[in-house]
Image (spheres, coloured by chain):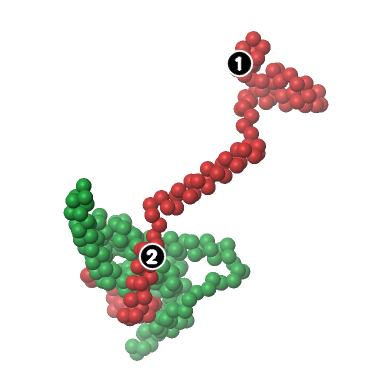
Amino acid sequence: MALGAAQEAPASAAVSQEREERFGAFVASHRERAVRLAWRLVGGDAGAAEDVTQDAFVRAWRALPRFREEAKLETWFYRILVRRAADHRRWRGVRERWASGADPEFVPARPEAPGDPGLRRRISSALDGLTRRQRECFVLIHLEGFTITETAELLGKPTGTVKSHLHRALAKLRLALADLRKTEEGAKA
Amino acid sequence: MSRTDDVRLDAEERAFVERIAADFAPPAMNEAGAAAFDARLRERLDARPRRGGVWLPALVTAAAVCAIWLGSGLWSPADPPRSASARAGAWETELLLGSDVAAESGNEAGYLPDDYSAIAAVFLDG
């Protein structure tokens, strides 16, 4: 019995070490993209983006032994991240409705995003005007560079549905941010 | 996941999308930011609750609340359902006599549905 335990311990430690290394590599290769995606999905809230991303990584750590293929873990991880971001938006809406007039929560100082804060708020507001699926399709494909096939797999929707959401999202945003297009044209002229 | 250009956009649309991508992005994560992120993630992994860590206290609390509620006497079994004909009978009697006879007489046998009356006759009167 003692011999068995002595033999098992190094094997268990090796498995644990392998899991740690695999997870470390996964975090290192997806950290920045995941935070950026979450940031865009939650509407530019850095604290919420980190919370959502870390929650997805914690779940990935737990699920790691189930996935031998890195590609499948990756798809699963981003699916969780997108869902957690949607949950966050839903709960934020509920909190805002109930806490109207209450003192705002303390938010720790974080580095300011680059660019014009006013324009950032306008883009965030225009994205708020989309449906959840339209926003997810637009952010994943146009802002984060996922393909339509990858996005369809992440969202569990047919590619035709993703294309339709994407088309509508772009049309709505062009309408909401029409002056941005004019500025672009003016800059070119 | 690699970017493949399977989305067709004209030049104007592409410029519009690129403008949004450039103006709606968080600050780039530097090495210190990445290290701080990893440290907070490590804390979170170390502090994660065990399986059942949330459910067990919730279950115990719910059981305690139920026990207090049942013991307080606030709970009482619901009245047995009464048939439509019985309800109509009580309503007609009350309307004719101008008082709640069923409540005052103490004899409710006449206001019980037939099946309840039969059971009462067997177990109470018999």
Mark 2 and mark 1 lie on one chain; the one further toward the N terminus is 2
What's the residue type where badge 1 is placed? Ile
Q: Can you tell which mark lies on residue A189?
A: none
Locate residue A3 relative to residue B38 in the image: left or right.
left
| A53 shown above or below B67 | below
| As drawn, A108 above or below A10 | below
Mark 2 Cα within 10 Å, few/some/many (few <14, many 20+)?
some
Chain letter behind tag 1: B
Is circle 2 on the same chain as circle 1? Answer: yes
Disc 2 to disc 1, how far (Cα)? 64 Å
Instruction: Give the residue furthest to the front.
Output: A2
Most distant residue in the top direction: B126
Q: Secondary structure at mark 1?
A: helix
Q: Residue at x 43, y 66 (%)?
A: A130
Looking at the rendered structure, which numbered label has been put on residue B119? 1
Q: Position of residue B15 (x, y in %)?
A: 32, 80
For disc 2, the marked residue is: B44
Q: State which quarter of the image contains the C terminus of chain B.
A: top right
Give how far across and how far down residue A97 sits, in percent: 56, 63
- Which residue occupies 33% across, 69% down? A34
Left or right: where does residue B126 sit relative to residue A32? right
Q: Residue at x 29, y 59 (%)?
A: A76
Expressed as whole percent of the image width and height from the top left, the position of residue A148 reads: 27, 64
- Image point (46%, 68%), residue name: A129
For chain B, the rendered hue is red
Which quadrant of the figure contains the N terminus of chain B?
bottom left
Q: Nearer the viewer, residue A72 or B69?
A: B69
Q: Nearer the viewer, residue A66 or A96?
A: A66
- Give the amino acid at mark 2: Arg
Subunit of mark 2?
B
Say which colour chain A has: green
Tag 2 secondary structure = helix
